[in-house]
Image: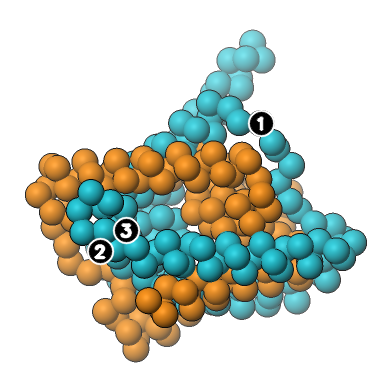
Chain colours: A orange, B cyan
């Protein structure tokens, strides 16, 4: 129980550091999707953020591989479907768990609150449908 | 300097995701599986992250500008439209189906597993798909 709380505190701190220094919202889907298209705005800070995710992820994976993706009954097709839905939906809805969830809710944005309620309800539905069709999680 | 901050933020953010359990598909699905053996761990992660940022957001916003930029780049939209809700619903279905959202998806690349690479490639394809659809739609409106 202590680990999710510590993880949450670290996430809350990191997005606050981003706002305090760079004045930016830490939305992972927005950062990723804006790297895919041409724009006049600087992309360097976005690339640096993704590199930070990967470098820290790599170091942690070396010590705690059990905390990462593990074998489950989900097939490769399941991950492709999930990825397509996550990519399409986050761009259409302007955000994901970090942008709408952590950053939006903390700003008391009603728009983000509606997005979070919607993706939580449909997230529960998605897991339910997966369980129904696969017989497990 | 901005880039160094972003790098550190990315590293801290990933560490939070990993120690909090967000990178593990089973934990996320266990959290969304409210009709099964509900694992409420992630609600603690969400509450603590939002609480910390809510307090710090108020303090940071007292400053006229961020430390390294001339202004805060905060979203200004307040409207709740169909696009927001349908997009969030599609994202939710994918999140529930795979147990991975964008941040953990990218962090999971370090495992080198085929599943994690397929997820990120498909996520990028999905993003481009919507961006192009939107462009087509805008061109139609102009005509």
Q: CA distance from mark 2 to mark 1?
A: 35 Å
Is B44 on the left-hand or right-hand side of B58? Answer: left
Is A35 on the left-hand or right-hand side of B37? Answer: right
Residue A107 or A15: which is nearer the viewer? A107
Disc assigned to residue B31 = 3
Q: Are marks 1 and 3 on the same chain?
A: yes
Q: CA distance from mark 1 to mark 3?
A: 30 Å
Asked whether the viewer can see residue A104, the reply is: yes
Which one is earlier in the sequence, the residue at label 2 or at label 3? 2
Label 3 Cα neighbours within 10 Å, binned few <14 / some 14-19 / many ≥20 = many
Identify the subunit bearing mark 2.
Answer: B
Rendered residue at 57%/58% (across/down): A102
Is A12 on the left-hand or right-hand side of B95? Answer: right
Q: Which residue is mark 2?
A: B26
Asked whether the viewer can see residue A55, the reply is: no
- Vertical comparison of A23 with B132: above or below: below
Location of residue B71 in the rendering, given as x and y in whole percent from the top left corner: 84, 57
Q: CA distance from mark 2 to mark 3?
A: 8 Å
Q: Nearer the viewer, mark 1 or mark 3?
A: 3
Q: Which residue is mark 1?
A: B79
Which one is earlier in the sequence, the residue at label 2 or at label 1? 2
């Amino acid at each position: 129980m202590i680990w999710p709380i510590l993880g949450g505190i670290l996430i809350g701190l990191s997005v606050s550091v981003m706002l305090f220094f760079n004045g930016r919202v830490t939305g992972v889907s927005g950062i990723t999707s804006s790297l895919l298209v041409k724009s006049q705005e600087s992309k360097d800070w976005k690339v640096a953020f993704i590199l930070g995710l990967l470098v820290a992820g790599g170091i942690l994976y070396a010590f705690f591989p059990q905390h990462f993706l593990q074998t489950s009954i989900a097939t490769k097709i399941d991950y492709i479907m999930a990825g397509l839905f996550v990519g399409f939906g986050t761009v259409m809805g302007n955000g994901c768990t970090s942008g709408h969830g952590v950053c939006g809710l903390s700003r008391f944005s009603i728009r983000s609150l509606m997005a979070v309620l919607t993706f939580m309800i449909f997230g529960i539905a998605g897991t339910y449908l997966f369980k129904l069709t696969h017989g497990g999680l | 300097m901005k880039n160094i901050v972003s790098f550190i933020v990315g590293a801290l953010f990933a560490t939070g995701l990993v120690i909090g359990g967000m990178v593990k598909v089973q934990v996320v699905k266990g959290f969304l599986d409210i009709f099964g053996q509900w694992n409420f761990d992630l609600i603690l992660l969400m509450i603590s992250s939002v609480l910390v940022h809510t307090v710090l957001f108020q303090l940071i916003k007292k400053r006229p500008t961020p430390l390294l930029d001339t202004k805060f780049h905060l979203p200004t939209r307040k409207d709740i439209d169909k696009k927001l809700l349908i997009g969030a619903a599609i994202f939710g279905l994918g999140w529930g189906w795979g147990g991975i959202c964008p941040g953990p998806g990218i962090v999971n690349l370090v495992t080198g597993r085929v599943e994690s690479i397929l997820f990120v490639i498909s996520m990028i394809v999905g993003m481009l798909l919507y961006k192009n659809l939107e462009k087509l739609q805008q061109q139609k409106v102009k005509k």
